[in-house]
Image (cartoon, grey):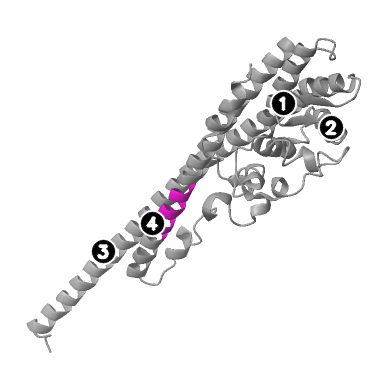
Amino acid sequence: MPIPLLLWGAAAALAATGVVKGVQASNMMDEAKEIGEKAERKHRRAAASLDEVRGDTQGELEQLGKLKVTVFTHQIRHLIEAIKRTKSASSKLQGFQEDFSIEKIKAYEKMILSSLELEKGIASGAVGGALAAMGAYGAVGTLATASTGAAITGLSGVAATNATLAWLGGGALSAGGFGMAGGMLAMGGIVLGPALAIGGFMMASKAEEALTEANAYKAQVSMAVAKMQAAETAMEGIVTNVKEISNVITELARRFDQIKVADDRDPVQFQRMLAMGTALKKALDVAIINKEGVAIDNIRAKCSGLMAIA
């Protein structure tokens, strides 16, 4: 019995609908894959950029730490040795509420010895973290709390626990470097990568689900990238502070070397050296990041008074 023309028409229409839906599903899956791949490339570029900035910032902090170590082991060491050659082994800085008592001299000597320990470890490359901490916090946060012989490993308090410093020294993201920040990076909780990978949504049972999950993945990546870019901006602020305080310390050290004397046989010159040495020590103590690991504002203003000392 011949199949009625109407049934042939219905079968053809049904087949056509199936083909259209199949094409639509295929297109959706292709679109989902494209969205996911673009998002992954975006995330990789942002992570690579942040890695580069992280490495540069760590390097800048270490260089500042080296500068501070050098000043402690040369200019500050000379200052303390000159003070110890005076008759009373104690000196009053005229015109300032500053004095170098026996206790203060001993505290300086402890920091000098710790700096010498750090200086020994620089060649081996084993003191990067300590140097970065010293660059970030100076003597107050680092050497002042480190005992002789333990300056490399004995840094305590905020200098040893700050998540930003831990992250900076933790290595590249691609190598799994997180430091003490664990599975989250400093600067607002930057995740290494969104949890859902392309393989996850490409296994979706329906094309519509794959497309929905791909768009959700894209949104996750955009959020992660925004946090990475914010972290880069924060790192730039830290580097700006490093350069500012480095210039101040270098200039004060230069001025100190021009006027330094071995003892107080020339009282006027000796007082000038005390004033310059005190300014230099205060510059070494200036912190450039706070306890949250964020760059401190207006470092230049904090140092302007130190630079005004003749």
First in sequence: mark 4 or mark 3? 3
C-alpha gap between disc 4 and disc 2: 72 Å
**What residue does disc 3 label?**
23
Asked if residue 304 lies left or right of residue 220, the reply is right
Counting labels gives 4
Which residue matches tag 1?
278
Residue 180 x, y percent position in the rendering? 68, 52
Q: Could you tell me if residue 260 is visible in this image?
A: no
Q: CA distance from mark 1 to mark 4?
A: 64 Å
Q: Which residues are magenta?
A: 217-228
10 Å crowding of disc 2: few (<14), some (14-19), many (20+): some
Residue at position x 69%, y 19% in the image: 253
Residue 165 or residue 210, whichever sits in front: 165
Label 1, label 2: how far apart the Cα atoms are: 13 Å
Residue 10 in the image, given as x and y percentages of width and height: 13, 80
Q: Is residue 225 found inside the magenta-colored segment of the image?
A: yes
Q: Nearer the viewer, mark 1 or mark 2?
A: 2
Residue 33 marker: 4
Mark 1 belongs to which amino acid? Thr
Please name which of the two marks, 1 or 4, marks the residue nearer to the observer: 1
Amino acid identity at mark 2: Ser
Disc 2 on helix, strand or loop?
loop
